Image (cartoon, rainbow, N blue to C red):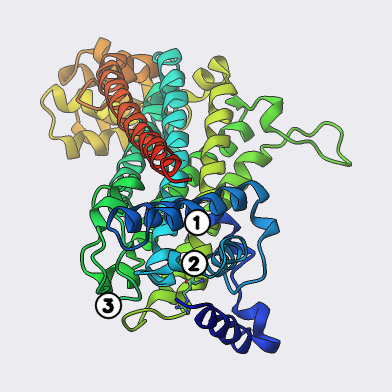
Amino acid sequence: MTEEGADESVIRRDRFSGGPARSFLSSLAADERIFEADLAVDRAHVVMLAEQGIVDADTAGEILTALDAIEVDGHSSLPAGEDVHEAIETAVIEQVGADGGKMHTARSRNDEVATCIRYRLREDVLRALEATLALRASLLEVAEAHAETIMPGYTHLQPAQPTTVAHWACSYESAVRRDTERLLEAYGRINRSPLGGAAFAGTPFSIDRERTAQLLGFEGVVENSMDAASSRDFLLETTGALSTLATTLSGLAEDLVIFANRGFVALSDDYSSTSSIMPQKVNPDTLELVRAVAGDAAAGVQGLSTTLKGLPRAYNRDLQRATPHAWETVDAVSEATRVTAGAVATATWDEEALAAEAGAGFSTATGVADALAAGGLPFRTAHELVASAAENGADYAALEAAAEDVLGEPLEAHVDPAAVKSALDPAESVASRDSQGGPAPSAVADQLESATAALAADEESVEALEASLEGARETLREEVNGYA
Ligand code: ARG
């Protein structure tokens, strides 16, 4: 490109500088989030252009040196621009001269921004994944400490059947484990490079897309160039996975708010707030905020899906406003997950209060019906008998009276009284329910074993992904140093 050509391009940018709509058009402020990503994408692209002989090594060296200086100065020092891509290119040209404009050979801001978003989102999803791992570890610690701590279990928020704190904690660990899986799967689809798709229609230059993908640590490319520049389903999928996680968290938070209200659990001071007027208050504010983050995340999904719906191929500026929904969601949900992990890890369970309430509301009734059914009564008949007892005292005497009433026979004719008395005891009731996945300490021990193994495997997966990104960063730095 001649100097004259460079001047023309500057004039063109002046002509389309936005006028009164300048700030409406600009994503420069929001793009701070992808400043580092854009520098990495620029570096990988320039290294590849030099390797392919599209840009000579000296020019590549000058551009790469300028990019290092721009990084040191930081996003806030960038010249004006419609977005970070334009501003960095302007800064490169300011330092290198017109040859700096060779950086944008064989690419467009369309493939560039898509690559930057994926590059940055990988980091953010890794932080979210780490938070899910921390929460799972906290829940498993609670489960290990409270295998025998009986507590009331609820349906419809009414006392239902006694269970244990460990069983409760494992139930949430199982759910968060699936949230980890969903994020890992989303990561696999984020982790592909659109770079080289150009505006959407490819390029006549002999670029090496696999090479830039490798330099940026991606597992291969998004092959079709139109798909590469256009698609944001990875944002919707990731935000959806985060929203599902936030929904899991909101239920966990709500349980803890209720348990705190009933005196079953006390949050540590670090996760509580007090009142500015009522001196005695210790409120579970952190968990209420966690509960609310499900609303933020659902809004993120809604914002994204509404923005993306009906967008034609290949690039439309709407996409600029899609991206922040994903940033806001990943930030809010990751923070909520970390806070929940801390609140769970530091809460204190009141074993006495839990035991005192474990049998409340005749929560052992199902176990008594089970004992009668095990003695040979049809379960439906046993259910009738126990329901009748529930309305007339809910104790052994009431069961004897109900047997005479419903069966016209003494209770002992159908079941060993010792079995009934055992079923009426909340702890024995829990211990009897040792079916796979159940609350009996023996069954929870099996769940803990598989949960611990799954957590270790997921920790390894996340570490491997982090190591792979770190390796790519080092490789790129070495390649850049060969020129700069
Ligand atoms: N800033 C834009 C975005 O975030 C990328 C620029 C592409 N602009 C364009 N007019 N093709 O999507």
Q: Secondary structure at mark 3?
A: loop
**Amino acid at circle 2:** Asp
Compare marks 2 and 3 and give the one earlier in the sequence.
Answer: 2
Pointer 3 residue Cβ closer than 8 Å to ligand 1? no
**Amino acid at circle 1:** Ile
Of all residues, the one furthest to the right in this rendering is 277
Q: Is residue 297 left or right of residue 212?
A: right
The disc placed on residue 445 is none
**Marks 2 and 1, how far apart at CA:** 8 Å
The disc placed on residue 63 is 1
How many numbered circles are shown? 3
Quarter of the image for residue 21 reads bottom right
3 vs 1, front mark? 1
On the image, numbered disc 3 is attached to which residue? 201
Q: Secondary structure at mark 1?
A: helix
Give me the residue at 41% from left, 64% from top: 112
Pointer 2 with pointer 1, Cβ within 8 A: yes
Horizontal and vertical percent for residue 56?
37, 58
Give me the residue at 57% from left, 29% from top: 342
Horizontal and vertical percent for residue 482?
41, 41
Horizontal and vertical percent for residue 26?
61, 74
The residue lying toward the viewer, choosing from 55 and 288, is 55
